[in-house]
Amino acid sequence: MKYLLTIFIFFIGLKTANVNQEPAFQKGEWFKFKMSYSGWFKAGEATLKVDEKRLNGKKVYHVVGKGKTTGAVNFFFKVRDRYESYFDKETGMPYKFIRKIDEGGHTKDIEIEFNHEEQKAIVNNKKHKKIKTISTEEGVQDMVSMYYYLRNNIDISSLKSGDEITTNMFFDEENYGFKLKYLGKETIKVDINGSKVKVKSIKFRPYVMAGRVFKEEESLTLWVSADKNKIPLKIKADLAVGSLRADLIQFKGLKHYFPIELEN
C-alpha cells in the first residue's frame, strides 16, 4: 500500500495539443475514490479538492490530494499522504508543490517552488533540512498540476488508438520523461454517488518502470470521462504482487453537465 496515492495521482501524464476551449473544472470541485487491493479488499480512500487562493500576488488554483489506508490495513501498514499544488489560473503552470507523506513509518516532507523563467525548481527537503536548486524542462508540471492542466488542453480528436504521447514532469528531486498509449474510447460501469451508471470514457495505458512495484511496463490502465469535465473514473495497476484499483465513488462541484446512463 506504500504507493497508494502516488500511483493514483501519477497515472494521468499525457501531453496533447494546447487547444483553446472552455475550462474543464472550477473552484469547489471535489472527488472521492475507493482504493481496493486485488479487486475486492478495501485498502483505503483518496480525495482531490480544488480551491482558489492568491500566492505571491497571483491568482492560483490550490488543489489538495489526500490518501489514507482504512480498516484492517491500518493495523499492519498505515498510510497518511497529502499532496498540494498551487498553479496559475490562466496558464496552468505550477508555482508550488508540497508532498507530505507517512507510509508505514516512511516519511517525507518536501516543498518545491518553480521558477519557470529560469527553468529551475527549488526543492526544500524539510525532513532532512536541505535545499537544492535543480534545472527543469520547459513547461514542466508537477504530478498534481499536470492532470488539471491537461483537462483544459486535451484534444482527443487528433489521436488514434495506439498513438503514444510524451510529457515532462518534476517529482521530488528529478525530471521525468513520461509516456503513455492512447487506447480509444470505452463505455464503463461505475458506482457513483450511490447509483450504478454507465459512462463514456477515454482509455490510456501509461508506461511505468517494471520491477519491485509494477509487474511490467504496461501495468497501468486508466479511464477518464469523455465529456467536458474529463474526470478520472477508474485506474487499475497490476503490481508485482496482486493489483490495486482506484474507483471514483463520489463527486460534487463539477463545472459541466455530467452525462450518464442508468443501468437497467
Image (cartoon, helix red, strand yellow):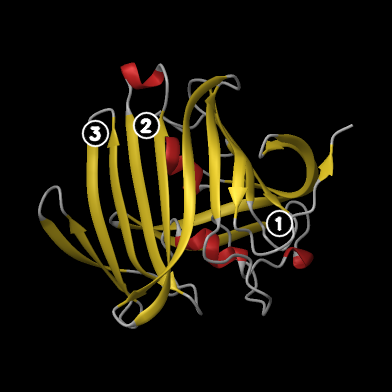
Q: Residue at x 71, y 52 (%)?
A: 225
Q: Residue furthest left?
A: 129
The C terminus, quarter of image = top right
Q: Is residue 63 left or right of residue 216?
A: left
Answer left or right for 120 relative to 201: left
Label 3 crowding class (10 Å Cα cut-off): few <14, some 14-19, many 20+? few
Give neighbour class at mark 1: few <14, some 14-19, many 20+ (Cα, 10 Å).
few
Q: In this figure, which residue is indicated by the disc labeled 2?
A: 2
Q: Is residue 151 above or below residue 5?
A: below
Residue 47 position in % (x across, y down)? 48, 45
223 versus 86 height, above or below: above
Q: Which amino acid, by three-letter code, is at mark 3? A: His
- Figure quadrant of the N terminus: top left
Residue at the spot 28% in from the left edge and 79% down from the top edge: 56
Residue under numbered circle 1: 163
Any mark on residue 228, and which?
none
State which tag comes first along the sequence, 3 or 1: 3
Between the residue at mark 3 and the residue at mark 1, the CA separation in whole angstroms equals 38 Å
* Badge 2: residue crowd in 10 Å (few <14, some 14–19, many ≥20): some
Residue at point 75%, 59% (across, down): 227
Q: Secondary structure at mark 3?
A: strand
How many circles with numbers are drawn on the protein?
A: 3
The three-letter amino acid code for the residue at tag 2 is: Lys
Pointer 2 and pointer 3: residues touching (CB < 8 Å)? yes
Amino acid beneath label 1: Asp
Residue underneath mark 3 = 106
